[in-house]
Amino acid sequence: MTVYLDHAASTPMKPEVTAAMQPYLSEARWMANPMSAHADGRACRSELESLRARAAARFACRPEAIVFNSGGSEGDTHALFGAARLLMHKRGPRMLRIGISALEHEAVRAAAMLLVDEMHELVVLPVTSAGVLPPEVVEQALREERFDIISVMSVNNEIGTVQPVGEIARLCSAAGCIFHTDAVRAVGHGLPEIESDPGIPLLNCTGHKFGGPRGAGILIQRGPWAGLAPEQQHAPLAQHVCGGHQEQGARAGTENLASIAGLVHALELATAEEAAHIEELRVGLEASLQERWPGTQINGAQARRATHITSLCFPPELCGGRSGPQLAAQLDALGFAVGAGAACQSESGSAGSHTLRAMGVPGELANATLRISLGWSSTQAEIDSFFGALQEVLA
């Protein structure tokens, strides 16, 4: 049986979520299309809007601001492309200047590069050695150049550092710039000040990072859109998935009622107490790692970090020159699932972690990095058994 320590890649569904989804998968009354005009369709539509209101309560936003989608990558892409097309539609076609942090997820990086292909300009904002984008860096960039869109992730997916997105959002608003945050690793992990911040106009998350189903996410379009005329500041973003008028016209496609129900239920189950317990396990894990193997480096340890992610580098004398993927493969053979970085990059053939490079982590350390991430099902017994397996691998 595998000991699962890769929750930042995907967290198992909670049994309560599975149970909450079951009626929508098995009862005939929930099989109708919520856009249909007959009685079953109207019932599904009413249930969908009830779920939307429950999600809105979690984020302290209007129900109309909630757009259900397929997950984090779609939310990131929709936020950037939707904002860009909205600006060009309202202000006329021109080159946009887009800023992202040097730490962003591949979905944001790829969407930004596609906008570059459309003749827009991209500026990558530098981070500190602790893995944080300081607000003063954003403030200076906004002062020196006009930005139209800036995207900064709330929690880095590799090292778990928490970014000051509330402060950055306010700087962007004052400068007439639309701000977006990828909150995929923040939502459901004890960061309510990010989830419910009314000053963040665009925020997205996905259910499978906090015990919900895969293939279900949310893009929150709070607005207002800085830089537009007052009557335009709550206009819907342009569709990215095109077709019908589902999701208030923001995202086409028949809504997946069962997965949306699971997503909302998982949101409600993700409590502050659960996050505090996971953080207690993580803090103990890191202390034991550094006590047992002196010289182990915890990436981003100087900054505030999310409750559940530990990124550690082993010096060559500890790991024998083996890489993170090699160490992860050896642990996998012993029945322990860990990450060697971001799961989205594991098959890309990329030359190491762009996050660790941006932080200035030396190559020999960055190469020998493991990511241990905990979740709702993690136990101290699992962590203790992991230490035994790691001892065997490093020996």
Image: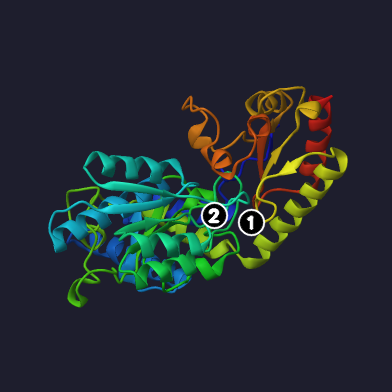
Q: Nearer the viewer, residue 9 or 131?
A: 131
Measure the alpha-carbon separation of dots 2 and 1.
Answer: 8 Å
Provide the secondary structure element on which disc 1 rests: loop
Q: Is residue 28 visible?
A: no
Residue located beneath label 2 in the image: 155
Q: Is residue 266 left or right of residue 291?
A: left
Residue 367 is situated, as x and y percent measured from the top left of the image, at 64, 29
Image quadrant occupied by the C terminus: top right
* Identity, as a three-letter code, of the amino acid under mark 2: Val
Q: Is residue 212 left or right of residue 260?
A: right
Q: Nearer the viewer, residue 140 or 228?
A: 140
Q: Nearer the viewer, residue 88 or 246?
A: 88
* Identity, as a three-letter code, of the amino acid under mark 1: Arg
Residue 157 is situated, as x and y percent measured from the top left of the image, at 54, 46
Q: In the rendered view, tell whether residue 134 sits above or below residue 393.
A: below
Q: Residue at x 37, y 50 (%)?
A: 76
* Neighbours of disc 2 within 10 Å: few (<14), some (14-19), many (20+): many
Circles 2 and 1 in contact, beta carbons < 8 Å: yes
Q: How is the image coloured?
A: rainbow
Question: Where residue 305 is drawn, which disc sits there?
Answer: 1
* Neighbours of disc 1 within 10 Å: few (<14), some (14-19), many (20+): many
Q: In the rendered view, tell whether residue 379 sits above or below residue 3.
A: below
